[in-house]
Amino acid sequence: MDGWLSPQEWQALTLSLKVAFWATLLSLPLAIGVAYALVRGRFWGRDLLNGVVLLPLILPPVVTGYILLIVFGREGPLGAFLESTFGLVLAFRWTGAVLAAAIMAFPLMVRAIGLAIESVDARLEEAAATLGAGPAGVFRTVTLPLILPGILTGAILAFAKAMGEFGATITFVSNIPGQTQTIPSAIYGFLQVPGGEASAVRLVLISVAVSMGALFLSEILSRRVARRVRGE
Amino acid sequence: MSLDLTLRHNFGGFALDLALSAPPGLVALFGRSGAGKTSVLNAVAGLFRPDCARISLNGRVLTDTERGTFLPPSTRRVGYVFQDARLFPHLSVRKNLLYGQRFLARGAAPPDLDEITGLLGIAPLLDRSVTGLSGGERQRVAIGRALLRAPEVLLMDEPFAALDDARKAELLPYVERLRDRLGLPILYVSHSLPEVARLATTVAVISNGRIARMGPAREVLADPTALPAFGPREAGAVVTATLTRHLDDDGLSALMLGDDELLLPRIAAAPGTKVRLRIAANDVMLAKTKPEGLSALNVLPARITEVREGGGPGAAVALRLGADQILARVTRRSLRELGLGPGEACFAILKATALAPADVVAETVP
C-alpha cells in the first residue's frame, strides 16, 4: 500500500477511517435511544426532536459547520466549557472532525434504526412482559436482538457518510494535512494544486469502493432484519 | 388458589361490566367475537388498564383502580397463551420455553422443563427453531412457555382458533391434562361450544360485555334459558355415561346413562370407561308415547322440567333422565299439539349417528 499511496494520501485515509470509526461508535448508543424515543415515545416535543435530528440532512453542510464553529469553537459557549473543564479542544482538531462527521451521519443512523424498531411486533414485547420481563429486560432480550441487523445497517451507512463528510468538516476543522485532512478534504486539496489529479483519482477510487461496499452490506443486512422479524 | 375480578370499562359504544371468581379448574369465557372476552384476559395480565377494576390473585391485589394499584405485567405471575402464539422468532424452542425462568424470583423452585415438555409432548422439538413449527406445535410451545414461568393463573385466548378440527382434537387432551393436574385457575376464552363443553369446569357466558349466565359447566350447558346465548343450533347438554359392551356385529357400543341403555357408533375404549357425551338439543326429538317402528335406536323415558320459548318458532325443553339433564329443541307447535309441558312424562329420541365424533370423549383414566 505504501508504494501505491503517498504519505499524505495514506494519512488522509487512516485519519478518515479513525474519524468515521469514532463518530459511528460514539453516536450509536444515542442514536438507538433517540430512534426508540421517536418511534415508541409519546412525549411533548417529539416532533421538535425529530426536526432537530433531521436538520443536518437539510441544512447546507457549510451552515452546520459554521454553527459548530460558533458553538464549539474555543471562544464558543460549549467549546470554552469543554476546554476549561476537560481540556478538550474540538475546533481545528481531529476530534472536531469526529463531532462534525457524527452530527452529519446521525440522521441516517436514526432513520435506519427507527425503521427496524417500527418493524418489531409490539405483541412480542407484550408476551415478554407477561413472562416476567420488565421494560429494560424486554428491550434487552426481545427488541434489541430483533433490531440488531437494523443497528448494523445504520452503523454502516453512518460510517460511510462519516468517511465522505466534507462541508461541515472543512468549515469546522479546516484542511490541515495529518491533523484534519480527511479523504474528501484531501481530494479537494489535490485538485487545487497542479499535478494533483493522480492523487485525487486514487482517493476517489477508495471513496467509491468504501461507499459501494457499505451500500451492499447494508442492503444485505436490511434484508436479514426483515426476514428475522417476520420469523423466517 | 383463586382469581377474583370485578371490572368496568367504557369502550365508547360498548361497555364491559362484569365480576367473576375463578377457582382452580377451567373457567370458559364463552361469547361471540367482540363480546369483550379478550379484554378480560388483558386486564388480568396488566396489558389493559380498565376505567374501574379490582383484580386479585390468591389474595394479592394486581389492579385496584380505586387505590391506584396497577402492577406491571412482569410482576403479576400470569401465564398468557395468546391466540397467535407470539413465540420469539430469534430464539430456539428451548430458549422460548425457558424465557420466563430468568426473571423468576431467586429461591423459587422453577417448574421442571422435562415435566412440562413431557406433559405437552414437545420434548423432540427442543432444539428446533420456532420458525419451522406447525400451528399446533407453536401453540403447545406457547403453553409450555407460559407454564414454565411458574404462573398462578393461566390465561388462554382461543389458543386453537387458528387450527383445523383435526389439530384441535389432538390438542384438547393436553388442555384437559393441564386442567386436571396443575391445580391452577385457567381462564379460557372461546367461541366454540364443543370446546367449552369438553374443557370447562365452569362456564361464563359473556354477551355485550356482561356475564349473561355463569355456573358449573353441566348446569349452564343444560339450562334452557342459556340456549339463545349458545346459539340454538349449537346448544347441548353434557352427560357422562359408562361404556358397558361393544356390539361388534353392528359396529355399535352400548353405554349406560343412569338406568337407560344408549347405543352409539363404536367408541374406541374398554368397557367400564366413562364417556362424556355432548348431546346437541337439535338432535333430540320428543314423543308423548313410546314410538313403535322407529329407526332411531335410543328411546329414553324422560320428564320435562322446564320449557323456554323464544321469539321464534322453537322452544328449548329441559329433560330429566334419571339423574341427568339434557336439552331438546322442538317447535312450539309440537309441544302444543302433543300437550307437553313442565312436569309431563315423555320419551326423548336420539339417533345413534347424530352425535359428532368430537362430542364423544372417553375420559382419560386419572
Image (cartoon, coloured by chain):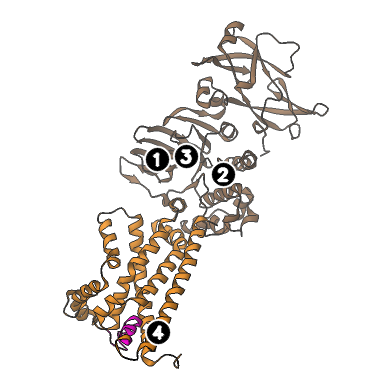
| Pick the front one: A53 or A5 | A5
Q: Are marks 1 and 3 on the same chain?
A: yes
- Residue wearing tag 3: B2
Q: Position of residue A90 (x, y in %)?
A: 25, 80
What is the CA distance from the residue labelled 1 to the residue labelled 2?
22 Å
For residue B241, side relative to residue A17 (left or right): right
Q: What amino acid is found at the position of numbered circle 2 in the picture?
A: Leu
Q: Which residue: 59% across, 25% down?
A: B236
Give the number of the disc on residue B182.
2
Q: Chain of mark 2?
A: B
Circle 2 crowding by C-alpha within 10 Å: few under 14, some 14–19, many from 20: some
CB under 8 Å between discs 4 and 2: no
CB under 8 Å between discs 1 and 4: no
Q: Position of residue B195 (x, y in %)?
A: 58, 35
Q: Chain of mark 1?
A: B
Choose mark 1 or mark 4, whichever is in front. Answer: 4
Q: Chain of mark 4?
A: A
Q: Are marks 3 and 2 on the same chain?
A: yes
Chain A shade: orange
- Residue wearing tag 4: A201
For residue B151, side relative to residue B50 (left or right): right
What is the CA distance from the residue labelled 3 to the residue labelled 2?
13 Å
